Amino acid sequence: MHTDVVLINLLVWMVGVSGQHYLGGQMLQPFRLVRSKREMALTEGSTHRIGSPMLKRSPDITKAWGTKSEQLLRIDDHDFTMRPGFGGPAVPVGVDVQVESLDAISEVDMDFTMTLYLRHYWKDERLSFRSNRNQSMTFDGRLVKKIWVPDMFFVHSKKSFTHDTTTDNVMLRVYPDGKVLYSLRVTVTAMCSMDLSRFPLDTQTCSLEIESYAYTDDDLMLYWKEGNRSLNIDERISLSQFLIQEFHTTTKLAFYSSTGWYNRLYITFTLRRHIFFFLLQTYFPATLMVMLSWVSFWIDRRAVPARVPLGITTVLTMSTIITGVNASMPRVSYIKAVDIYLWVSFVFVFLSVIEYAAVNYLSTLQERKERKLRERLPCTCGLAHPGMMSASYSEVDANTTGNYGMPEENGVKQERMLVQMAMESDQITGHVGTSAYSNVWIDTHVIDKYSRFLFPGSYILFNIIYWSIYSQHTPEAH
């Protein structure tokens, strides 16, 4: 029996050494070799099958890292729909702002556009974690959706958006003690109520207001983290029409009758308008048109084709300037400073046209009177008064009926009617009945003479008053 057992073990050993044996006339392979071939065939078949379940079960490294951070912050262990310290005192949330650009200020729409970095600081002990090196962890916008963040919004904003190129411009930084820094890049267009009564010599003050939408001052206390130093301005900011004078921060309480009191943060900035553009485009052209209308006072009153088109041209040009300025301005219900200047200039131009109309009309009336008096006077052909012969017949005005030129008196050429000569001849010959015309003097240039000094003097006085009123309250740049 013992010998049989030894023979069987010897036979098994020999089969293992040879690596093969025959069974029923067929060559049999060892079990170990058959198993390795089956595993190779299975592996080769899996590499050729694209939809293999083995590829779908490959580990996601990104997901694994996200899971580790969430486990470290214990996000699933807390309810982040409630504010930190719910039921206790208000959560202090510090804010600081860095203004990147002040893009546009529109008088027509009464608004401004600003791009800024808005940062929030608060403490949430639910996010505290252990750290041997006391280092913070930084995340992007994906984690923001899973934790509590302050619900800030811009009061009186017309539109705003968070930049998302190439990804959402949102940053979240968590410290081991639970302190949180939440930063985002925002562009906002907000309302700015402008007073244009002094336009374009005006100074405008606009403000961007930040407030919590849901939490009153009992739940959330907003404050500027470092006072006025919490607001940082890029030095490269510049505007085409305005000079930035001042940026400062303030904090106030806002009351809503249905919800209560809220903390509100203000970013207030003061802008002074550049006047040089409007001097070139509005004030200088208007002033030149007024001065051009004065040229007609030095043109002969009989030159109708020269004086009439000159007056009409200046009037139409002033109308065009007024229309162009009003087209780019909002339709306010009060008078602006530029309106006063343009309309007064328009009145001066219009009065210059009326002045020539008055000169022409008075000259026509005088000529009619001269004709009637000449028809009623007797012939003075035989008159030989020595005092009257000093007047030369060569100085007779060709367009003045029966008028003789007289010497200049006080620098003004006077014209005396023929009736004066007839009156003196009547006194010599003893005729009576013409004494009513003894003081008849005609001076049709007197209106032009006074207009040459009255119009420029009045306009200069207006400019002195205008610029003294609208410039004295304009604050200087800091």
Image (cartoon, rainbow, N blue to C red):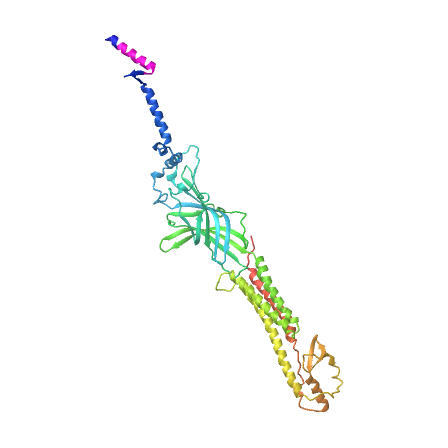
The chief SS type of the magenta part is helix
Asked if residue 140 is positioned above or below residue 248 in the image, the reply reads: above
Q: Quadrant of the N terminus?
A: top left
- Is residue 350 visible from the viewing direction of this image? yes
Position of 87 relative to 108 (above/below)? above
Q: What x and y, as percent, mark residue 340?
A: 54, 65
Residue 7 is situated, as x and y percent measured from the top left of the image, at 27, 10
Please report the bounds of the magenta region as a residue range.
5-20
Residue farthest along the left direction in this orientation: 1
Describe residue 376's horizontal placement relative to residue 100 as left or right: right
Can residue 451 be seen here? The reply is: no
Image quadrant in which you'd find residue 365? bottom right
Most foreground residue, 168 or 474: 168
Of residues 54 and 326, the one nearer the viewer is 54
Magenta stretch contains residue 245: no
> Percent position (x, y) of residue 369?
63, 83
Q: Residue at x 37, y 28 (%)?
A: 44
The answer to which of 355 and 134 lies nearer the viewer is 355
Residue at 72 percent of width and 91 percent of height: 429
